[in-house]
Each structure stands twice: as structure tokens, then as C-alpha cells.
Image (spheres, rainbow, N blue to C red):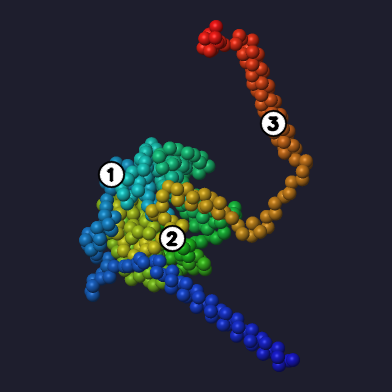
Amino acid sequence: MAAAAPRAKSQRLRWHLKLSGQREEAAAARAARLDLLLPEEPGFLEADPGEDTCTITQGDIAEAVDIASAAKHFDLRLEQFGPYRLDYTRNGRHLLLGGRRGHVAAMDWQTKALMCEINVMETVTDVAWLHTETLLAVAQRRWLHVYDNQGLELNCLKSFPGVLQLQFLPYHFLLATAHSNGTVTLWSPTVSEPLVRMLCHRGALRALVVDPTGTYMASAGLDRKLRLFDLRTYRVLQELVLPQGAGHLAFSQRGVLAAACGDLVQVYKGVGKEVPPQPYLCHRPPRPPHGLRFCPFEDVLGAGHSHGFTSILVPGAGEANFDALENNPYRSRRQRQEWEVKALLEKGFDPQAKAKFKPRRRAKGNNLLHRKRKVAHEEQRAVIRQSVEQREQEKKGKRKERRRGESSLPPKRGALDRFKK
């Protein structure tokens, strides 16, 4: 019996290993089948021997790509109300521009169709889309305002004065704001105190950005240093010394980092995996950039400046394939409404809190409000029943009177009666 037990254990172990191997093979086959549904592949610039990619201009890139991609490189000349801040929707379809002198414009940037254009007659410090392209937030000089895509003001949040930067959390339906105290803190929506406080630079901070995966954070300070942090361990991964320092930072979906250094936009590839010896791409807008944003699912970097807006082509920056159930750039109005309802139902659900939640059973007859509503409903039903019975009685009375009137009239004499006479 003692020898049979180890033999049974070894058999069970082999059976478990065989089952796990079959599961791994099935998962690999399923992943190989799903790869057929992702036909697009990302690509980067490849320089000739002895050539640097940072010397390739936007004109050269526009000539080498197809017509549809070349049309995504353009300039909007808006010299009257700049400098401009900008933001893209999560599906990369719509663009929001906010000028320092009060100009706010929302548009479908691919078709160049203007959705709305207003002037708030106040200083604008930052703009941000909310969960869909129908709502937008504008940080103005005094308070934070919320508008719809037609330019109508829906709400004014007076508890947020002097906001400098906006960021919307799509999975929590929360709007985060940054102020001028210079402290880098990490917060949780359910905790009233900051979870982490980080000393990123010895001087004041100029720019801060977190990549879409939430793994890396890049910061730039007055010491002209660009540092990359791993948010899982809160340690410095890389450190670059820039000639003029970075005033604005932006991360793309594939980890490409853009930095606005004076009047030059520098793009770095491979951040977090290797130390980039030199920029991957460089571009000089008409004026120094005041805001940077990568467009989701597009190889496009948007830069706002005092003369308007510039769309820069950055090959390999965007994700080549999109999930139509999560962020669909081509969704219809009905699909957007269905997604919005689904997102509202799923937002903020904590599995542990949901498991601990126990609905309270209401005892019959003990709720005063329930009894009042029930009595009111019964009284309303009695009034309706009485009015219906009264109408029926009135109809019966009219019928009886009509019959009595018809019986009192003399009988009509027809043509045969006259002929008989």
C-alpha cells in the first residue's frame, strides 16, 4: 500500500502535466488563428547606411507614404488666439483645440469637419475630451467648465479654480487636474490621501506624462534632465540630459516619447528598453510648441503653438490594429450610445465590494414611505374607477333618452302606403 500511493501521485502529476500541455497548445493555436485578424503591422523609419533618421524631414516622409497618410501632415494657421493646447479622443477620430485667448474648437480632424467653435472670452489653460466626443472640459481662468460638442455650456465647477492641466480617466469616469504646487503625487480615486510621493528632480518640474499602459512615467525639470521611472518599483530607469530641457512631453501607444525642447520637437524610440543615443525624429514647428499629443491608432503627433496647430507624421507611433468593441474610430451614433451605456454600467465596480454587498430585505408594512405611496396609488385607482363608472352611466342615460324620443315620433308612411290610399 505504501508503494501504491507514490505511484498514484506520479500518475496524477503526469496527468496534470499532460493536461497543462494540451491547454498551452490549444492557447497557442487559438492565438495563431487570431493573428489572422490583425493584418496591419507597425513600421518605423529605416535609414540608409551612414544616415540618421532625425535628419529626415516631414516633406520627405510625406513624399514616401501614400496619399491618405500624406494628407495627415498639415498646419492650421490660427495666429490670433494662440498659443494652443490640444487633445484627441480615445479612438483618435476627433481633435480639440483650446487657445490661450479663449478660442475653443472641436473637429473631426481626418475629414476636417468642424463640430463647434466658440470663444469663452476668458483665458484657457487646458482642454480635454471626456468619455466620448460629445462632452469636453475647458480649464478657464477662474473655473472649470464642461461643454457639449455644439458649444453649449452644461456645467461650471467652481470648486476647481486655477487649473493648469487636465487629464480624464476613462475607466473611472473621473477628471484629474494639476495645480501649481510642483509636487509629484500618485492618487487613487477611493483614497483621500496620496498613495505615493516622488522626488523626481532637485528643481521644479516642467513636464510630466505617463504612458498608456501605466508602467512608465517620464518627467522633465529645470535641471534639463529627462528621467524615466518604472511605476512598479518607483526607480529611475533612464536619464537623458537635453540641450534646452523639455517643456512638454507625450507618450504614444507603442512607447514612443516626444519632448518639446525649445522650438524643436524631438521624438525618442525604444524608451524603457534601451538608452536612445539620439532622437528618432526631429521637427521644428513654426513657433515653440505649447502642447503635445499623440493621436491614438495613427502615426501622428499633434503640436499646438502660438501660430496654430501642426500635425507631424511619426512612423511607428500608433497601434496598427484597434479593438472595435473598445475604441472604434468608425463607429456610428448608435454604436457610440450603446458603448456609453455599457461603460456607465461597468464603471467603478469593485469585485470585492460587489462580493461583500448584501441587499437589505425590506419588511412588508414597515416602510412608512412605501405605505404612503400604496395609499396614494389606491386613492388614484378609486378616482379613475369612479370617473369611468360615471361616464358609463352618462352614456347609458343618453341612449335611453334617444330611444324614448324615437318611440314618441309618428310612424313614417312609405310609398306603398300612399299607393294603397
Which label's residue is closer to the chain start, 2 or 1? 1
Residue assigned mark 1: 79
In the rendering, at what x and y percent does residue 318 appear?
A: 37, 62
Structural distance between the alpha carbons of marks 2 and 1: 38 Å
Q: Nearer the viewer, residue 155 or 417?
A: 417
Q: Label for residue 381? A: 3
Q: Amino acid at mark 1?
A: Glu
> As displayed, is residue 141 above or below residue 296?
above
Q: Residue furthest bottom?
A: 3
> As displayed, is residue 80 above or below residue 310?
above
Mark 1 falls on what kind of element? loop
Q: Nearer the viewer, residue 350 or 237?
A: 350
Q: Nearer the viewer, mark 1 or mark 3?
A: 3
Q: Are there few (<14), some (14-19), or many (20+) residues within 10 Å of tag 1?
A: some
Q: Nearer the viewer, mark 2 or mark 1?
A: 2
Q: Is residue 277 left or right of residue 230?
A: left
